[in-house]
Amino acid sequence: MTRFWIAAAGLMLTPLPAAASAQEGEKFDCVVASVPAGTKDLIGAAMAGAGDEASRDALFKELATITDRCVARHAIADERKGDYFDYSLARISREWLAVDIANLDLAPGVVDRALDFGPAGTNPDLSSEMSEEQIMKIVQAYIEAGVDIEKIDGAVWEKVGAYAAATSIYWNKRKLLAF
């Protein structure tokens, strides 16, 4: 117990790096924390193909307004504004799709491992299209995880693909936003 309190005291005395890290977290979290839950659901569903073009445009305009407020609040450089918007959109979509596909009994972590997504991953760029090889890596990873892929509906696979694309954009834009 004494070791815990000593370690905790050491953490509380840690100067600027922890404070800077918290500020970085605030920058990364600002848009996501500012978007109402219902709007996040609509954005996630839109990125999975729901809604029409007009409703998606309205959602993106609302997200752009929130992004602009966060850019101003955190003094994010104008040249990073597009990356910040893309990061925020990808993060909201990724989080929504992760829950959605998990509710369909497909673990999103399988995709993350199959395509090497993460802070130290290769994070392949899927912003335009997935290759046949990347698709097969995901399918094989689910087979190895014990999923009967023959029972997976095409619409579910589209959500898995949307999750992979959102995750790719999320990690690649996050790296560009080295605050």
Image (cartoon, rainbow, N blue to C red):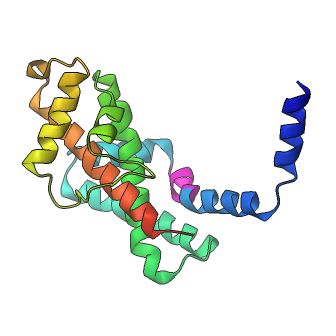
Q: Main secondary structure of the magenta part?
A: helix
Q: Quadrant of residue 102?
A: top left
The answer to whether residue 10 of the structure is visible from this angle is yes
Please state, as top left, top right, bottom left or bottom right, where the C terminus lies in the image: bottom right
Q: Toward the viewer: 158 or 111?
A: 111
Residue 116 vertical placement versus 66 (above, below) = above
**Residue 76 falls within the magenta-colored stretch:** no
At which x and y percent is residue 80? 45, 76
At which x and y percent is residue 62? 42, 61
Q: Which residues are magenta?
A: 29-35
- The residue under the point 20% across, 37% down is 138
Residue 48 vertical placement versus 174 (above, below) = above
How many numbered tags mark residues here? 0
Answer left or right for 99 relative to 149. Answer: right
- The residue under the point 16% across, 46% down is 134
- The residue under the point 57% across, 58% down is 30
Query: Furthest-front residue in view?
Result: 3
Q: Toward the viewer: 40 or 2?
A: 2
- The residue under the point 70% across, 64% down is 20
